Amino acid sequence: MTLVITPDPSRHGTGTPGSDPTEQASVWQPLRHLLTALDDDIARLYRERDIAGVRPRFVMPLIRLGRRGAMTIQELAACLEVTHSAMSQTVSALRREGLVRSVAGSDARTRQVTLTKQARAVLPFLEAEWRATEQAVQELESEIPYALSQVVRDLEAALARRSFRDRIAQHLDALPEP
């Protein structure tokens, strides 16, 4: 994994009005790049192990369906704590890859999502990979002075005091009118 986290300040503007804000040194982008690089490493592992059609974002819903059985999109979204819209998009992508299908629910108005034979065949590997990924994160945490899980808890506590939306809005409101 090759990851450049610190931008070269000499290549960025001064932050003056009218300058391109996307060319300024960013605190946000390195985190986004890091998460993308980690997901890319997991996806590369899938390719190396001939796990076709699976992306890292698919694994949690696939495991949950494998463990709990068929669910509606709404039920799956609720138990994974994502929006219905996000889960609907994920299920559509899973369907395109041949990993899930929809079946009639308990009444004519509902459809349930269930795993296909292809998904069931890769499920043991996906569960093993999930556990191995958690172990790798714990290993990484032991190598750094401030654990990632602690960073997340600290950020959640700070955001509970004042939301990210409110923080952004405050900075927007402080800007001079264009």
Image: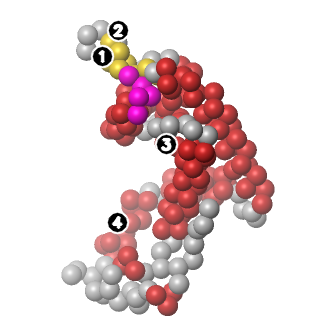
The three-letter amino acid code for the residue at tag 3 is: Arg
Give the quarter of the image for residue 48. Answer: top right
Classify residue 76 as left or right of residue 108: right
Task: State how far apart marks 2 and 4 are (Cα).
Answer: 45 Å
Query: Residue 35: in sight, yes or no?
Result: no
Across and down, in percent, residue 95 comes to 37, 30
Check contact, mark 2 vs mark 1: CB within 8 A: yes
Q: Are marks 3 and 4 in contact (CB under 8 Å)?
A: no
Residue 84, numbered circle: none
Membership of 39 in magenta stretch: no
Question: In the depicted view, which residue is nearer to us: 52 or 82?
Answer: 52
Placement of 139 over or under 99, stated as above or below = below
Distance in Å between CA atoms under marks 3 and 2: 30 Å
Mark 3 lies on a secondary structure that is: loop
Mark in the foreground, 3 or 4? 3
Q: Marks 1 and 4, Cα distance to the nearest angstrom?
A: 40 Å
* Residue highlighted by disc 2: 106
Q: Which residue is mark 3?
A: 55
Regarding residue 134, the answer to whether it shows in the image is: yes
Identify the disc placed on residue 169.
Answer: 4
